[in-house]
Amino acid sequence: MTTGARVLLDTAAAHGIDVCFANPGTTEMPIVEALDAVPAIRPVLGLFEGVCTGAADGFARIAGRPASTLLHLGPGFANGIANLHNARRAHSPVLNVVGDHASWHLAYDAPLTSDIHSLARPVSGWVATCAAADRLAADTAAAIHATSTFPRLPATLVVPLDHQQATVPARVPAPGPVPTRPRVGGDVVEECAKALRAARTTVLLLGDDALTERGQRAAAAILAATGATAFSETFPAVAERGGGLPDVDRLPYFPEVAQKALAEADLVLLVGAREPVSYFGYAGIPALLAPPGSVRTLARPGEDGAGALADLAEALGAPPARAATVDPITAPQSGELTPQTVGAVLAAHLPDGAIVSVEGGTCGYPFFTASARAARHTTITNTGGAIGQGLPVAVGAAIAAPGRRVIALQSDGSAQYTIQALWTMAREQLPITVLVAANQRYGVLQAELGRIGAPLDGPATRSLTALTEPSIGFVELATGYGVPAVRAASVPDLTAELGRALAAGGPALIEMAL
Amino acid sequence: MTTGARVLLDTAAAHGIDVCFANPGTTEMPIVEALDAVPAIRPVLGLFEGVCTGAADGFARIAGRPASTLLHLGPGFANGIANLHNARRAHSPVLNVVGDHASWHLAYDAPLTSDIHSLARPVSGWVATCAAADRLAADTAAAIHATSTFPRLPATLVVPLDHQQATVPARVPAPGPVPTRPRVGGDVVEECAKALRAARTTVLLLGDDALTERGQRAAAAILAATGATAFSETFPAVAERGGGLPDVDRLPYFPEVAQKALAEADLVLLVGAREPVSYFGYAGIPALLAPPGSVRTLARPGEDGAGALADLAEALGAPPARAATVDPITAPQSGELTPQTVGAVLAAHLPDGAIVSVEGGTCGYPFFTASARAARHTTITNTGGAIGQGLPVAVGAAIAAPGRRVIALQSDGSAQYTIQALWTMAREQLPITVLVAANQRYGVLQAELGRIGAPLDGPATRSLTALTEPSIGFVELATGYGVPAVRAASVPDLTAELGRALAAGGPALIEMAL
């Protein structure tokens, strides 16, 4: 016999969970205590729950399997919702374990009582409250199975305090086979091949596992054989880039530009991507970005898109494409920091095998433009638009891939939502280099105000979109959280500091004055 | 004719809203633009939504009326849920305005789309999505009326982008009478008077408006006439203290101690407070803390508890009690900082009319013990247990009460959840003195681990409850956010720095090494 908390952790460990991003409270203390007896699961503390859920998302994107979070009742879970929203959009597997009041205590509506299911459903593919202590092992296994099954979504298991403390049999269900991506049927591949042969102008829109190396190689073969072009979805969960992979640009963000990019296509073939829609609805601009009637699906998100691309290449008789020849990047040597020079400096100095978490448009797009010719690296972007994901996913990525360098290319406004992630970087001594684009404004909001013709100089407009008076001192914030930090104001500055930061064993932050 | 955004703001202003705690995004830009045309509403930017919702809660507690928040779709709202949970438990009126996708765009499930109602219901007494632009004025008025009606709860109005932009009649509904607290019936007062006369040992449990000066004066008369004793609820939303008011202690937090405090009572009379329940459920300890059969209600939260106390005093023939004689506090002059010396130093130097936001047990309880004899002040506590409310409510309190000094007595762990509040203090130059009790641990969790007999020295337990490696530099964090900050390590240090900080016009932070 053992405790409910212990059997929960033993089951999680047996089913492949080896990290727990935690911000526990009183109702999770038995699980915290039990973690000391289950060394297979590494506890990682976040000072704020959004750090934990974002880290679990980043871990899943890089490791390809779930981590767990440990969160405190409804309010603690609520603080993690924004990054779970991004995880849901990324189809990331995440096991959320949420403590709750003892089951017999719920009826008294104590201060921390709330409707956890109502909070969890919008961001979870599976939600349940453990109904009895002797169901904890089975419920844990079911939650992990649910979140691991394609198309993967976070799963949330609510565990009352008394069940964690109860004495239960030490019986751990045997893990079944790890779920795999459903294969795309040969008939679908054949029909797509036929459509592609018939089409005048084809655009492949790649997402999910079509952006792995295997997927991109197969896509490159199709492009070379057919003259089709390709985009990646605008905000891919994870994408391989550089090092001789084809230069697959992202579909542009603003709908007019995206529509223009697709305007000539009579076939837009979706591979792991959804039909492209305008990020926001603008009066007079259609929501659907591809020409009417042009859209066809080879693989849905969660299906074996890379395999389907390989099958499609074969059906088309397309020979493997050569690796793109890579002109070395000429890094700028002098001048001011601009989004373009920042993108170019980072692309030129990117270590081989780096993981780049990109949040924020300021430097994100210029970096993408520059980095197709960089060393091989993996990019992670904000899939759901809930800002404050860049730093936490970097934490999770670093823990998922020891030995790989992680770079967080981060806008200043969005960094603030989960700034506490810096502390976890310091605590775990993660090899993360944070580059903050400190342009001291919500740039995207000022752009949107421009789109609706609003002046930017009204007192309210200015007050709500400028990050000045006072400006935010990221160097001081990083120092407060134990992360070494400097400011860079020019290209030579940034180049030198980036070199130092990339050589360091632990985290470092560079505030870039733009 | 005008825009939907404008008529929303004009209606809000006409119905008494004069502050908007905002963290807007693209779907709120028309409202941001319209704020420039409605100077009656002051926009206050928070770098994180929990700052906005907590500030609205603090504003409501001090001003007694709602402020608005402006939040960005589901994920932005989600970041504000934890402090709305506290606002709900405080019965604070709050008008949440949440932008959403254009109504015709929702069907496309763009990345930021989510189920906002499911997120909002657990923390709102009223939730609606505006169904048509010409209903915006009426919906805004209805939301304000709903949140202003006792017992007050936050109201959440979701406003699609197209309705904000639409052209609508510039017609603002006339405000009705401001809702008032329902009076308690004479029969209830009579029955309570009878029960009190018959009881051997009576405890009054005061909450809500029973903790106003008027309520406490009436309670003091009843205590003096009957020999009853009184507690305040453990976590009052707002309470007047000091300056000759009776020394009403809070009902203790841990259930064994609270039960002992009530054990002798054959009558526990609730006035604006709910029946006391254990904060968490502990095996073997009953959830209900008052002796069985002892509980009777004079006034429910939201009813006119202060009036009911006055009526009860009259029914009992109790003459007005004299103001308690106040022995001046002797402040310690030397020694280490401990929770006791911190509480005593602050109580001794508290400016008349100060507002004290207390979050965290470390110094909170000792301050309460010391401050009954302090100058007259108002305390605010964490009503719902969602931590990260202390700094935001201080922001809202300062904006609600210009000219009053605000002090945030804040534990270090809980400060981290909404640390971005410091920036808003600097931006608005609010007269807030932040005292951080830097004991570098989640003290309450270590206490709870002790209660379940868990050792504190296991690697996981230690890692998840100690805020060390690295320790958090609050001075550096405050500096990064533009708030002047110092460390204090002894009683003379703290005394000198507190004097300087209280004399300053704007915010200041003192990190107290405990």
Image: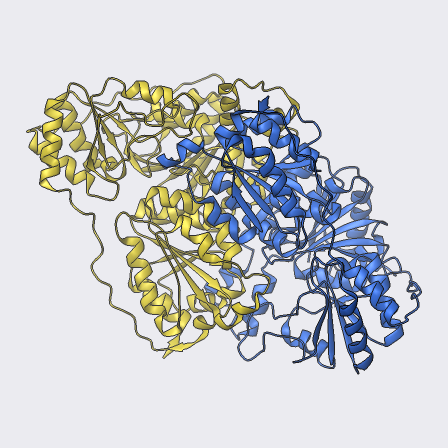
Chain colours: A blue, B yellow
Residue A384 visible:
yes
- Is A201 placed above or below A406 here? below
Q: Position of residue A372 (x, y in %)?
A: 82, 62
**Residue closer to the observer: B83 or A513:** B83
Image quadrant in which the C terminus of chain A is located: bottom right
Name the side, left or right, on which B263 lies relative to A322. left
The residue shown at (76%, 64%) is A185
Q: Image quarter for residue A213?
A: bottom right
Counting labels gives 0
**Is residue A335 visible to the viewer in this orientation of the structure?**
no
> Which of the image's four quarters has the N terminus of chain A?
top right
Q: Say which residue appears at 47% left-offset and 21% top-offset.
A: B491
Expressed as whole percent of the image width and height from the top left, the position of residue A456 reads 53, 68
Name the residue located 35 percent from the left edge and 63 percent from the top edge: B40
Q: Position of residue A323 (x, y in %)?
A: 92, 62
Residue B113 is left or right of residue B239, and the answer is: right
Residue B304 sits in quarter: top left
